[in-house]
Image (cartoon, rainbow, N blue to C red):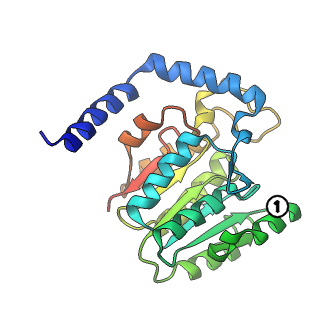
Amino acid sequence: MDPIKKFYEKRLTDIMKMGKDSKLRKMTIDWMLKANEYKYTYNFKWMGRPIIQYPNDMFIIQELVWQIKPDLIIETGIAHGGSIIFLASMLELIGKKGKVIGIDIDIRKHNKNEIEKHPMIKRIIMIEGSSTDDAVIDKVYNIAENKKVIMVILDSNHTHSHVIKEMNFYGKLVTVGSYMVIFDTCIENFPKGYCKNRQWDVGNNPMTALDEFLEKNNNFIIDEFLNSKAILSNAPRGFLKRFK
């Protein structure tokens, strides 16, 4: 057998087995809860800006961007800007004339200044406002017009009601073969009341929104390979592929 093919076939078998390992998944949740005491995801930067994600998730998103080569990536939630800079840098490496739209209800001045000074700003469009407001959606749809490959990443307000609206609005823009990534589905796996002083909790979070969306939308499917591959992830079951 071709050694490259052999490597990937063995890897696929191991990944799918790993995804079914309930003991490992429980250990992962326990690890996340303990690491969160130290704000573990705040430890990393991309090209100088805090990214506030697990490296596993960003590696998978890197693989997806390289694979599908989008000419537009839409991300809700900007925070410090590390993620939109990461996405812009991937598009820069690919070499296409791709753009990243970052949407946030409050782009803090100090973060906005740092993002605007960054060399990747040439590929970034920032929109301030709620991702579910009509005016914001109209801007995004106008920019998305005539784009051939569109990817969406949702990581803003994590309540069920907000995320289901985002999925319904922005899911329509995702092109066949591309992905919509739903972050913080992990909230559903945490203890009830864990997210103190937040609107979201067990039963009211991106995972519950994802389940409702899939019940009513048959154009997307959970990519079980990526779900098994990530394990340590803020987006369990959250990598959705549009297949029709």
Q: In the figure, residue 49 lies in which quadrant?
A: bottom right
Q: Quadrant of the N terminus?
A: top left
The answer to whether residue 169 shows anywhere in this view is no
**SS for callout 1:** helix
Where's residue 197, x and y in %?
83, 36
Q: Quadrant of the C terminus?
A: bottom left
Residue at the spot 69% in from the left edge and 71% down from the top edge:
119
Q: In the figure, residue 92 lies in which quadrant?
A: bottom right
Dot 1 amino acid type: Asn
For label 1, count other residues whose C-alpha is less than 10 Å away and answer few (under 14), some (14-19) or many (20+): some
| Furthest residue in direction left, as rendered | 1
Q: Is residue 28 above or below residue 3?
A: above
| Furthest residue in direction right, as rendered | 109
Where's residue 186, x and y in %?
59, 35
Q: Which residue is mark 1?
A: 111
Q: Is residue 220 above or below residue 225?
A: below
Where's residue 76, x and y in %?
65, 60
Q: In the figure, residue 229 lies in which quadrant?
A: top left
The answer to whether residue 159 shows anywhere in this view is yes
Q: Is residue 5 above or below residue 102?
A: above
Using residue 3 as the reference point, say whether residue 117 is left or right of it. right
Residue at the spot 26% in from the left edge and 37% down from the top edge:
7
Where's residue 69, x and y in %?
42, 67
Residue at the spot 63% in from the left edge and 41% down from the top edge:
205
Residue at the spot 55% in from the left edge and 48% down from the top edge:
58
| Furthest residue in direction top, as rendered | 23
